[in-house]
Amino acid sequence: MINALNEADREIEDLLPFYHNGRISAADRARVEIALGTNAELRRRLDLIAEESEAAIVLNEAAGAPSPRALDALMAKIEAEPKRIAQQVGAVRRGLMERLGGLIAALSPKTLAYASAAAIAVIAAQGVVLTGVVPGSGPGSQNYQTASAPAASDGTFVLISFAPEAKAVAIADLLKSVGASIVEGPRASGLYRVRIGDKALPRPESERIVARLQAAKDVVALVAPDQ
Amino acid sequence: MESGSDEELVQRIAKGDNLAMRVLYARHNLRAFRFLQRLLKDEALAEDALSEVFVDVWRQAASFEGRSSVSTWLLAMARNKAWSALRKRREAELDEGVAEAIEDDGDDPEVQMQKSDKGAAIRACMEKLSPEHREVLDLVYYHETSVEEVAMIISIPENTVKTRLFHARKKLGELLKANGIDRGWP
C-alpha cells in the first residue's frame, strides 16, 4: 500500500538520504527526527534508503582499486612537471623579448631617442640613489683626461647597446661608416658611450646618425643620445 | 604515515613537496578511483583519469583556496575528467553509428535471477541507471557527501541536488517494480 506524503513530509523525505549518511545540519536532523516519530511512511522510506545505501556501498567496493603502478606513473609525470614549467617560463620570456624587440623596431628614431633618454635618466637617478654620487659633483669630480684625445665632454655622444650576436668586425665597420668611436664602456648596463662627432652636431645631423646606427639591427640593439 | 590535514598537504604540494603528494594520493586515490570507475565503467580509463586528477592537484595546489574540503575538490575534478571522457566516448560511438543503449525497464534476466536476493536486485538495477543518477546516488550513499558538497561537485544548485536524488531513487524503484520487486514506492 502506497501512502502519499503531504508537502511538509515530502521536504523531510528529501532530507532522509542525508539524515541516513549523517551529513545534515543539527536543525534539519531535529526536523527529521520529529517527523519520523510521527510518520510511519517516512520511517518505511528511511528503510528503503538504508537498502539503497547498502547496495551502493557494495557496488563501490566492488569497483576495485588503481593498480600499484598508477602511483609510479603519476610521480613520473609530476617529476617531469618542473621542466615543463621551466620551458613555459622560457617561452614566455622569449616571447616578451621578441615583443620588446618588435616594439623598439617599430619606434621612430626620434621617439626611440626620447624613450631611451628617459630610460637612461631613470637608470642614472637609480645610480645616484644607490651610490649617493652625482656625476660632476664632490671632491673627486676632476675626471681623468688624456692629453691626446679630445675632452670627454667635447663632441656629440650616443649610448649604444650592441646586439649580443654582433661581431667585433661588424661593430667596427658600422662605427667607421658614421665616423664614430667608442669612448667608454661597457657600463654595468651593457651600454657603450660613443662619440659621433668631435663637436656639438646640429640636431638633424645627430638624428640622422642615430637613425643609421639604429637601422643596423644585427649590430645595434639600442641607441640613444647622450648629453 | 605522515600526519597533517589534507589542507596542510595541499599547501606543501604547492611548494613542490613530492612526499605530501604521495600522502594525499594514499589517502584519496581509492575513493577517487571508484568514483571514476563507477562513471566510466572502464578500469584503464578510470586510472588515466585518476592520474590526470592528481597531476591537476600538483599544478593547481597553489590556487586551492579551501572553499571546499580537499576531498570535495578532488571529487569535483574527478567528475570533470570522467564526464569529459564520457562525452568523448559518446561522440566516438555516434561517429561509429552505434546507437546508445536504450533503457529497458522490464524483465532483465539478471534482475529476475536475483529476485531471491533483494540486495543483489537493487544493485543490478542501480547499474542500469544513467550515469547522472548513479553519480548522485554514489556521492550520497558511498562518499557520504552533504547537499552542499554534492552541489559543489556536480556544479548544480542545492535544490537541484535534492530533486536529482529524488528522481534517481524514483527511477530505481521503477526499475525494480518493472522486474517484479515492488517496494511500495514510487
Image (cartoon, helix red, strand yellow):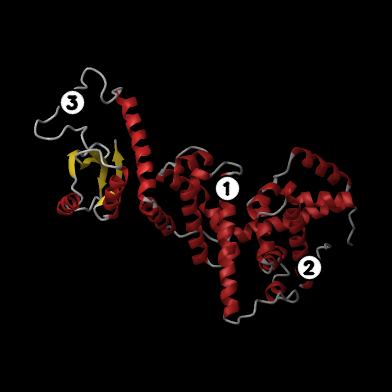
Residue B174: give its label. 2
Residue, disc 3: A143
> Can see residue A227?
yes
B184 versus B140 height, above or below: below
Q: What's under tag 3, amino acid-wise?
A: Asn
Residue B121: give its label. none
Residue, disc 1: B71
Task: Using the numbered discs, state the Cα–Cα distance from disc 2 to disc 3 in whole angstroms.
Answer: 99 Å
Task: Using the numbered discs, state the Cα–Cα distance from disc 2 to disc 1 in whole angstroms.
Answer: 32 Å
Who's the residue at 65% across and 60% down the image?
A: B135
Do callouts 2 and 3 mark residues in contact (Cβ within 8 Å)? Answer: no
Q: Name the side, left or right, on which A49 lies relative to A139.
A: right
Residue A159 in the image, given as x and y percentages of width and height: 27, 41
Task: Using the numbered discs, state the Cα–Cα distance from disc 1 to disc 3 in whole angstroms.
Answer: 70 Å
Residue A197 in the image, given as x and y percentages of width and height: 21, 42
Identity of the residue furthest to the left in this view: A148
A5 versus B104 height, above or below: above
Q: Give the camera-side residue of B115 and B74.
A: B74
